[in-house]
Image (tube, helix red, strand yellow):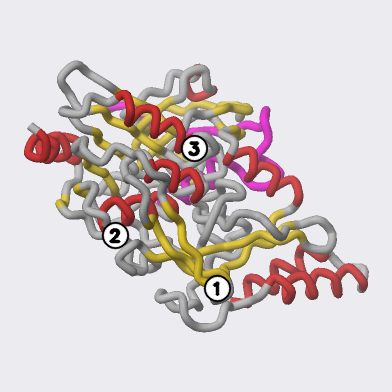
Amino acid sequence: MSGQEPLCQPRRVRRGAALTMVFASVLVAGAATGSLPAAEPEPASAVGADGSGPRPVRHEDVARAAAEAMAAGKSPMEAAERAVSRSGDRWGAVYSPGEYEEFEDALDGRYTGVGLSARRERDGRIQVTRVQSGSPAAAAGIHQGDRLRTVDGEKVDGRPVTEVVSLLRGDATDAEAGTEVRLGLARGARDWSRTLRRAELSTDSVTVRRAEGEATVITVSAFTKGSGDTIAAAARQAAAGDGVILDLRGNSGGLVSEAVTAASAFLDGGLVATYDVDGEQRALHAASGGDTASPLVVLVDGGTMSAAELLTGALQDRGRAVVVGSRTFGKGSVQMPSRLPGGSVAELTVGHYRTPSGRGVDGRGITPDLDADRDAVERARTVLGGLGR
């Protein structure tokens, strides 16, 4: 798959291999959390956080393993998976043609699921943060603020949101429209269960809230196709004096090109990030003409990953925004896809990206300028008040 854009977003957990993180917040109900399709860069645990050191495995190595297995009458995909799993590439993954197509659909804003978004609270409980209108979850009467207790009988308390999304999403055979998933829920003192059928859904990865005399809040759940332009349009319409809150909490990444477009909404050209692909250094630049005057606060948390960290780091390093929240995940690697013999697709780590000041994000994350947890939005409003009023 030469010529493909590098990817910058965590992948879906496949048979226990890589982390499941596509749409970890909007799609906890069913998309491919940790599984946004063809986008941009990603890393591996065996590669140094500074981008140095040999890559765990090369595309040609995996392709050779697949070809040899095919010639021997064995499964090329299984051989490729073994090569990747033995390599130490934490973010490497192998997808069947159908799985990769689903991944690409997710980046287009389409997914199969039940329409829930969720987050893990400090006590480990999983709370529903959003229910998509017209979704199976909405039809079942599930509300924002409800607690998700079990998925198909498995307790979810204490689990990473990415694992919860994997359960909701189902495995390769279950993740189809019409398949059932049983949820255990709680609301106050009431516990109940609902069996939902997954459905093909579309999602708006960007939501905008405006109120008279208040800051515009732009919430971005993932960088899917077109999200950058949507963010830019919302930024242009925001009242300059009231400022913008860019909420990237729970954003698991996506297309780096969309994150760069989003950066261009708030910068007047200049460097957004650098990254390396097999040792070749490359740079990402913002377009000129962005709004550099309106007060801007970026909200982040431990679920802010990959392309979302790239954007946060650019705005922080360039002095364009105050970052509020908690330390981000620390996913700063570059992955590239390639087609294997037999039609499957391997995504392997090829490098790491850095913020404009040269900071490596992988394994470190981004430290906010101001810490905040539950009161993050109110803290952001207070900061905006000090910046622009």
Q: Which residue has dot 2 on it?
A: 366
Query: 151 or 226: which is nearer to us?
Result: 226
- Image check: 53 left or right of 212? right
- Amino acid under disc 3: Leu
Q: In terms of sequence position, does the residue under pointer 3 or pointer 2 come before the other? A: 3
Residue at point 44%, 18% (across, down): 141
Residue 134 position, x and y percent, is 51, 17
C-alpha gap between disc 3 and disc 1: 34 Å
Q: How many other residues sit within 10 Å of disc 3, few (<14), some (14-19) or many (≥20)?
A: many
Q: In terms of sequence position, does the residue under pointer 3 or pointer 1 come before the other? A: 3
Residue 215 position, x and y percent, is 20, 28
Q: Is residue 74 above or below residue 188?
A: below
Query: 344 or 257: which is nearer to us?
Result: 257
Q: Would you say residue 347 sits in the magenta stretch?
A: no
Residue at point 63%, 28% (across, down): 200
Q: Nearer the viewer, mark 3 or mark 1?
A: 1
Would you identify the image quadrant in which residue 91 lies?
bottom right
- Image check: 71 left or right of 133? right
Would you identify the image quadrant in which residue 25 lies?
top left
Q: Would you say residue 181 sits in the magenta stretch?
A: yes
- Image check: 358 left or right of 183? left
Q: In terms of sequence position, does the residue under pointer 2 or pointer 1 come before the other? A: 1
- Magenta segment: 160-188
C-alpha gap between disc 2 and disc 1: 24 Å
Q: Considering the numbered disc 3 on the image, is that residue within a helix, a strand or a loop?
A: loop
Q: Which residue has dot 1 on it?
A: 280
- Amino acid under disc 1: Glu
Q: Which residue has dot 3 on it?
A: 27
Query: 165 or 92: which is nearer to us?
Result: 92
Residue 50 position, x and y percent, is 40, 76
Residue at point 32%, 51% (across, down): 312
